[in-house]
Amino acid sequence: MDTTAVALIVTVLVVQFASIGMQFSRSERRVARLEHKLDQIMAHLGLQDDDPRLQQVHELARTGRQIEAIKVYREATGAGLKEAKDAVDRMVA
């Protein structure tokens, strides 16, 4: 193969991977918004998640151990770093 064909193939692959990455990013943002809305609905209704690790997150956040709280929150929920930090910040506020 000549270098032009290889360059064209590499360019196409890079564009495809970038497109897939953008789609995942959009999906993650949509899921985060939906989870946030669900959290608001649950708070409005006075409902709490029964996962005992979330109680541990509340205790850690209340005692000023936010980094540990964020780590446990991420393990319990599978949330990303920013989402977990925002959730712990809401608990502290």
Image: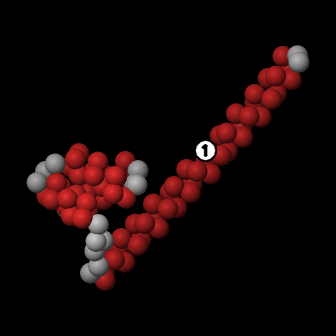
Q: How many marks?
A: 1
Residue under the image location 26 percent in, 81 percent down: 46
Q: Nearer the viewer, residue 88 or 79?
A: 79
Tell me residue 80's x, y (percent): 41, 50
Residue under the image location 77 percent in, 34 percent down: 12
Q: Is residue 79 left or right of residue 62?
A: right
Quadrant of the image occupied by residue 56: bottom left
> Which residue is outermost to the left?
63
Question: Which amino acid type is shown beneath numbered disc 1?
Answer: Gly
Secondary structure, mark 1, is helix
> Which residue is outermost to the right?
1
- Please, is residue 69 above or below residue 49 in the view? above
Residue under the image location 61 percent in, 47 percent down: 22
Q: Is residue 10 left or right of residue 17?
A: right
Tell me residue 11's x, y (percent): 75, 30
Q: Is residue 90 something that shows in the picture?
A: no
Q: Is residue 33 left or right of residue 59?
A: right
Colouring of the image: secondary structure
Q: Is residue 66 something that shows in the picture?
A: yes
Residue under the image location 25 percent in, 60 percent down: 53
Mark 1 is surrounded, within 10 Å at the Cα level, by few (under 14), some (14 to 19) or many (20 or more) other residues, namely: few
- Please, is residue 40 above or below residue 28 in the view? below
Q: Quadrant of the C terminus?
A: bottom left
Q: Pointer 1: what residue?
A: 21
Tell me residue 18's x, y (percent): 65, 40
Quadrant of the image occupied by residue 48: bottom left
Q: Is residue 1 left or right of residue 86?
A: right
Tell me residue 74's x, y (percent): 34, 52
Q: Quadrant of the N terminus?
A: top right
- Please, is residue 91 above or below residue 25 in the view? below
